[in-house]
Amino acid sequence: MFEGHMNAVKLLHLYDGPGARVAPAVRNGALLGVWGADGARPLRGFATGGGLRLEGEKIFASGLGLVRFAIVTLRDGIADDGPDRLALVDVSDPARQDPSAWKASGMRATVSGRFDFSGLEIDAGHIIGQPGDYVREPHFEGGIWRYCAAHLGGAEALVALWRDALATRGRLDDPMQLGRYARAVSLCRAMASLLRETARTVEAATDEREAIDAAVAAALLARQFVEEGCVEILQLAEKSLGTAAYMTGTPIERVRRDLSIFLRQAAPDAKLLKAGRLLAGASDAAPW
């Protein structure tokens, strides 16, 4: 939820829009979000004089009842082609929220689900930037480093709970357990180091095409490494704890289950292929 909030703040900072309008609410604790996934009825905006009438829905909308303002992607109400636009919309109406649409076993605390925008009207002041800004690099794919940091946080939480469980059971001095635990800690440290470097690369990238491509490739590679590292940590913890890792109602089971689903971000194979293409096309023969 916090990563989504920071993503929204970043978009408002990068592109012209209603940042000043919501700044007081944010300072008073309002939570923002970014909802991009369309449902069966993609979100569209129909011109109504000085504003837009919205029709459609968003799914996988995290923070129903928690997020007050969401940045959403929307299509032109008439044309099917062309880049999406961004708009900031008040999503606090509980009558439009459907948390029952979230069927996954994990990440239930995010209160994700479907939000129906049909009939909502917004004025021109709610529009953010220009068409296509949402996917502008290096802050779209490049911004992957932020949710990778959240993945790492989940892995670190699991490792801490795992260590406490071993200590409670008097098994922390077992050589096999120590080996698994040390491997997990080393993976967390490696991921943290890589993500710090990746964040600096992305946030400092210039507008030059080569710098943008390098930043995006760095983020995509970091995403692959973090996913693989987290999966290995999950496997190590499960092997170490046995059935205790699966006992419902325990912090370990919840963190393990939440991290397992959080890692399943969209199109991982496509992201790795894109990184490979960017690296293969780079002028530097040594991309590291």
Image (cartoon, rainbow, N blue to C red):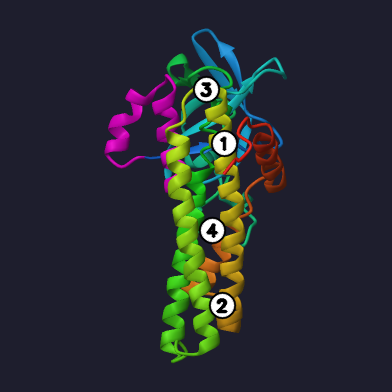
Identify whether 1 is placed above or below 171.
above
Q: CA distance from mark 1 to mark 2?
A: 36 Å
Magenta range is 1-30
Q: Which residue is mark 2?
A: 245
Q: Is residue 207 magenta?
A: no
**In front of the other: label 2 or label 4?**
2
Expressed as whole percent of the image width and height from the top left, the position of residue 55 reads 62, 26
Name the residue: 45% across, 30% down. Answer: 11
Give the residue type that dot 1 points to.
Answer: Val
Contact check, label 1 and label 2, Cβ < 8 Å: no
| 10 Å crowding of disc 3: few (<14), some (14-19), many (20+) | few
Identify whether 247 is placed above or below 61.
below
Q: Which residue is mark 4?
A: 108
Q: Which residue is mark 1?
A: 216
Give the residue type that dot 3 points to.
Answer: Glu
Give the residue type that dot 2 points to.
Answer: Ala
Expressed as whole percent of the image width and height from the top left, the position of residue 262 reads 57, 55
Q: Is residue 28 magenta?
A: yes
Identify whether 17 is placed above or below 151.
above
**In front of the other: label 4 or label 3?**
3
Q: CA distance from mark 1 to mark 4?
A: 31 Å
Q: Which of pointers 3 and 1 lies earlier in the amino acid sequence?
A: 3
Indicate the secondary structure of the residue bearing disc 4. helix
Q: Which residue is mark 3?
A: 208
Give the residue type that dot 4 points to.
Answer: Arg
Q: CA distance from mark 3 to mark 1?
A: 12 Å
Identify whether 205 is placed above or below 245.
above
